[in-house]
Image (cartoon, rainbow, N blue to C red):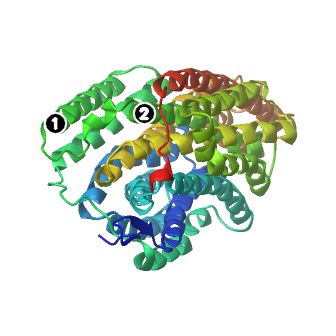
Amino acid sequence: MTSTYLPAADGRLLPRPGRWIALGVLVLAVLLVAVDATVLGLATPFLSEDLKPSGTQLLWIGDIYSFVIAGLLVSMGSLGDRVGRKRLLLTGAVAFGGVSVLNAYAATPEMMIVARALLGVAGATLMPSTLALIRNIFHDPRERSLAIGIWGAMASAGAAVGPVVGGFLLEHFWWGSVFLINLPVMAVLVVVGIRTLPESKNPAPGPWDMTSVALSLVGVVGVVYAVKETAAHGPDWEAAAAGVAGAVALHWFVRRQLTLTAPLLDMRLFHHRGFSGGVLADLLTILGLSGLVFFLSQFLQLVQGRSPLEAGLAELPAAVGAVAAGLVAGATARRFSVRSVVAGGLAAIGLALAALTGLSQSTGFPLLGAVLLVVGAGAGFSFTVTADVILSSVPREQAGAASAVSETAYELGAALGIALLGSVVTGVYRDFTAPPGVPADAVSAAHESLGGAVEAANGLPAHSAGALLAAAQDAFSAGLRLASGVGAAVLLITAVAAWFLLRDQKLEDGAGH
């Protein structure tokens, strides 16, 4: 493979300057996926008005992207180890750009769900490749920690750039424009990446087992679908069947990996306590955060009446905190300890989410900004250090598979978070009592989603419209408060678990390089 390290006279590997340019290309991919994930929250009210999805369809539009990515990440990480991570990354980038056009011009809720699923397939090729290439480009542990910090900071920056850029686009163009911003970024990534990225892969990968690919996809999607449907509508035979099928597929997947000479995922990686602890911390952290973030943009616009651009700017402190924390996380963990930085970051997020249990229509920006700043800083510390622990605990040739497990935890947590916490918000919201005198069709539309309530109110007399909208906004705020409390509990429990699971974990030191 092409190396970013040149052999010195004494046999040591000396880094060549191009590694930082290569990192710049990799963070472009991360930036793009992060922007795409967060910009949808801002576009949801406009999308709802245009496509008129039901509440369930709206949840699917929000989480099918994460479902598909979660189901395919392990397979794509393993594929990158086999065919080359650079090749997979650049192929995925072209596909991501093409499918973004399909998202932009979706004409029905069903078409939008399919387009988001296809975007998930393309996204699954990008994420594990970026982290795996960092593992192979940066051999010095301290440099790698900084590179991972920059990688994580750009993912957080994307979470902020998405709402701001998306808000600007939504005020001047139609909602599909938020997907078309992917095209110029992907063009730059492909053109520069061809010249600067080194190719790397497992020198003896073995065959790619398609049975394992199918089992991982069926297993993850089946289990997540069952959780989502049960949380949204209560237990029924369809959700139970999907859950059983998913669990059987995952059990079969694990058994199969233990018998293959070249497994899709080496299950022995989980014997490393740092690896397992980092993966679990990532999954539960994102589960606690994602549902809240998905609905917060709707709260800022449809409850507090902010414009899309104002809503995007209001969420900016989270990214500022994450960027700042991500850049110093590695050095902080070396000075103190891995478990104190990760557990402390998770506890900070939990306490910040607990503060949101007092959220109301009159909650001012100073409180929201302070809470989001703490959430971002906690996430920046936690995610950067756990990514470093996960990557440094495996051999370089398995970097793709390890990165894929880390990213699977992230995406699976996002899907479960939107499904579970989103269902909490939706469940509370749908129970609100409509004021007397409102037509039945308007009440039905209002109970589907807050966006539906806003649209229904537009066709009513002023008094009825105001009463209906006030009832819907109060119910949505109540749901968001309850979801914040659930998220806070999840994060505080995760902080305690991380304290014990990451005991004695240390980041590698670069002194020997």
Mark 2 or 1, nearer chain start: 1
User: Disc 1 designates what residue?
Assistant: 256
Q: Can residue 105 be seen from the camera position used here?
A: no
User: Disc 2 designates what residue?
Assistant: 274
Instruction: Locate the N terminus and report the quarter of the image it occupies.
Output: bottom left
Rounded to the nearest angstrom, the CA distance separating label 2 from label 1 is 24 Å
In the displayed structure, 44 sits above or below 238; it is below
Tell me whether the residue at label 2 lies in contact with that at label 1, contact meaning CB atoms closer than 8 angstroms: no
Q: Nearer the viewer, mark 2 or mark 1?
A: 2
Asked whether 99 or 257 is in front, the reply is 257
Q: Amino acid at mark 2?
A: Gly
Asked whether 241 or 463 is in front, the reply is 241
* Residue at (49, 41) in percent of width and height: 507
- SS under mark 2: helix
In the displayed structure, 28 sits above or below 252; it is below
Asked if residue 364 lies left or right of residue 487, the reply is right
Asked whether 463 or 37 is in front, the reply is 37
Instruction: Locate the C terminus and report the quarter of the image it occupies.
Output: bottom left
- SS under mark 1: helix
The location of residue 150, given as percent across then percent down, is 58, 57
